Image (spheres, rainbow, N blue to C red):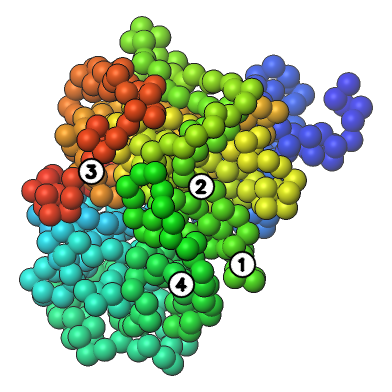
């Protein structure tokens, strides 16, 4: 029958088939095996485009890192690798967990960002330095060392598109650019680097004269407001104060937009929080997101107007809530014995109506998905709220309680720490664990799969986490893992069984395991650990 079909039609169907199906068809049908082998490159290239692995007319070498492509020799092996990476994130393939760098300068990391394609990590430290290390070896490539007495202690940093941004004590933002790309665009005409930056650059070049990675001063942005949070998503830098936010175009240094009225008028609340605190910000192509203690506000970049507000006080956000339940050592689902990620057991709770009343909680982090369609919100007590297709709520096409996904990631006593949203996966670090959440939104009833880092469950270590990042192939967090996964699993189950786990309204400040303050984190072991899902 296959011989009666036009070859073009068969190739079209094969190009739209799941990658695993192509392999199965080769095993069960000689005719299809012959067709697939004869047109292998074309079929798998089209399949890669159909499944969203690469844009049309693009090659995988232009998009993915050498770490993603190790051992890849064509479109077929590339597609198969994409399937294995997805399975690795679900804990169904082997993965590794190792300390990124053992040098003293990288043992007290405060903030860091990953450039997986260029193969380096840029980080700041609690001791006052900015370091660039090789992703594969951990060797220092370039640095503004603490001996230079230049970078402030506990400096915040962000990175994207070859630019690194970090702050000074006076809240000014320094922007440095990769030296190899320094002349790829016109130099900015405003906010030029000052003499301190230029002197620090000259001294760093003397220390690292032949490095493959160097940064040069690009801008010095003086802030017209008291900065509470900032976020750099190339090419835009969003800087937020209490009542205003400003967007800068980093390549030119131009101030392109100001957003006003971030806060509602202060009013009394039944709990003790700073009602006007700005905890986090993010931005997409069309929106600015401001995460305050009592609410998330979404602003239109086109008009500057607030177009969506979600409060942090809801006991439940959705009729469908997911929560983790203790694991059965004899029945861990779908987990590879050599994976550093363990699939968690989840329980879905369905409510016909949402309870009234307020909850003692606050938003601490927000991230918009890379596609710009979804928003992830992190509440302070180990709860994740996902807003899929949030523009439908703005347009009045959907209700919040029908759309939002409410996920309880362990005992609410353990404070939330950090949030990342990359490659259709959400990573959450709390004082009770490090989790990767997979959303299945294309089903009639959306559901979630949750994995945890098997050897990161000890609150004594997790409370010192200050940063977490996720790339295509790895999860990076500055937390020392336990050497014993079985002990870590017992610790996790014990934490889940905490007496407060199902009584959210009983929680008060005195019951919460809080994250260690920065001055105590100096003494903590805070090197970066790299969980790599690529095993070749």
Q: CA distance from mark 4 to mark 2?
A: 20 Å
| First in sequence: mark 2 vs mark 1 | 1
Q: At x 14% / y 69%, what residue is drawn?
A: 145
Q: CA distance from mark 4 to mark 1?
A: 12 Å
Q: CA distance from mark 2 to mark 3?
A: 23 Å
Q: Which residue is mark 2?
A: 311
Q: At x 37% / y 77%, what residue is drawn?
A: 225
Question: Which secondary structure, mark 2?
Answer: strand
Q: Is residue 87 left or right of residue 338?
A: right
**Callout 4: 10 Å neighbours few (<14), some, many (20+)?**
some
Q: Is residue 45 left or right of residue 487?
A: right
Q: CA distance from mark 3 to mark 4?
A: 28 Å
| First in sequence: mark 2 vs mark 3 | 2
| First in sequence: mark 3 vs mark 4 | 4
- Indicate which disc residue 305 carries: 1
Q: CA distance from mark 2 to mark 1?
A: 18 Å
Question: Which secondary structure, mark 4?
Answer: loop
| Most foreground residue, 296 or 117 | 296
- In the rendered structure, are the residues bearing label 2 and label 1 in contact, judged by CB atoms less than 8 Å apart? no
Q: Nearer the viewer, mark 2 or mark 3?
A: 2
- Indicate which disc residue 244 carries: 4
| First in sequence: mark 3 vs mark 1 | 1
Q: Which residue is mark 3?
A: 515
Which image quadrant: the N terminus?
A: top right
Determine whether 117 is above or below 421 in the image: below
Query: In terms of image quadrants, where is residue 415?
Result: top left
Determine whether 480 is above or below 227 in the image: above
Locate residue 185, reporting x and y percent.
48, 83
- In the rendered structure, are the residues bearing label 4 and label 1 in contact, judged by CB atoms less than 8 Å apart? no
């Amino acid at each position: 029958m296959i011989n009666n079909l036009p070859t073009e039609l068969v190739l079209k169907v094969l190009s739209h088939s799941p990658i695993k199906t192509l392999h199965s068809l080769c095993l069960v049908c000689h005719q299809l095996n012959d067709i697939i082998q004869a047109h292998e490159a074309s079929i798998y290239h089209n399949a890669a485009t159909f499944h969203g692995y690469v844009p049309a007319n693009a090659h995988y070498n232009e998009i993915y890192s050498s770490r993603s492509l190790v051992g890849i020799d064509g479109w077929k092996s590339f597609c198969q690798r994409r399937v294995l990476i997805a399975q690795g994130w679900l804990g169904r393939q082997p993965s590794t967990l190792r300390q990124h760098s053992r040098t003293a300068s990288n043992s007290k990391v405060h903030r860091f960002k990953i450039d997986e394609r260029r193969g380096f990590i840029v980080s700041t430290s609690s001791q006052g330095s900015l370091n660039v290390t090789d992703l594969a070896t951990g060797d220092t490539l370039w640095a503004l060392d603490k001996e230079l007495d230049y970078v402030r202690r506990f400096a915040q940093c962000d990175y994207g598109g070859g630019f690194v941004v970090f702050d000074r004590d006076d809240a000014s933002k320094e922007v440095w650019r990769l030296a190899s790309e320094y002349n790829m665009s016109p130099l900015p005409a405003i906010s030029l680097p000052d003499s301190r930056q230029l002197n620090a650059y000259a001294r760093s070049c003397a220390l690292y004269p032949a490095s493959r990675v160097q940064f040069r001063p690009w801008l010095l942005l003086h802030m017209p407001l008291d900065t509470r949070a900032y976020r750099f998503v190339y090419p835009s830098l969003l800087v937020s104060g209490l009542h205003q936010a400003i967007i800068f175009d980093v390549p030119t240094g131009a101030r392109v937009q100001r957003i006003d009225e971030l806060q509602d008028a202060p009013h009394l609340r039944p709990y003790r929080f700073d009602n006007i605190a700005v905890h986090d910000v993010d931005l997409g192509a069309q929106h600015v997101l401001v995460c305050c203690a009592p609410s998330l506000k979404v602003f239109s970049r086109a008009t500057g107007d607030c177009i969506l507000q979600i409060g942090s006080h809801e006991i439940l956000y959705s009729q469908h809530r997911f929560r983790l339940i203790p694991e059965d050592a004899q029945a861990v689902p779908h987990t590879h014995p050599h994976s550093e990620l363990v699939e968690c057991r989840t329980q879905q709770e369905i409510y016909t109506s949402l309870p009234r009343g307020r909850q003692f909680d606050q938003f601490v982090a927000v991230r918009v998905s890379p596609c710009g369609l979804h928003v992830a919100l992190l509440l302070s007590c180990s709860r994740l709220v996902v807003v899929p297709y949030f523009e439908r709520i703005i347009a009045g096409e959907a209700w919040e309680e029908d759309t939002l996904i409410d996920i309880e990631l362990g005992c609410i006593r353990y404070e939330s720490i950090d949030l990342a949203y990359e490659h259709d996966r959400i990573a959450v670090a709390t004082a009770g664990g490090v989790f990767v959440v997979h959303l299945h939104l294309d089903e009639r009833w959306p559901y979630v799969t949750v994995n945890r880092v098997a050897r990161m469950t000890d609150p004594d270590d997790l409370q010192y986490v200050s940063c977490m990042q996720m790339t295509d192939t790895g999860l990076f967090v500055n937390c020392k893992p336990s050497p014993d996964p079985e002990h870590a699993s017992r610790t996790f189950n014990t934490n889940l069984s905490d007496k407060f786990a199902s009584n959210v309204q009983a929680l008060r400040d005195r019951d919460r395991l809080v994250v260690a303050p920065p001055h105590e984190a100096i003494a903590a072991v805070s090197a970066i650990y790299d969980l790599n899902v690529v095993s070749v």
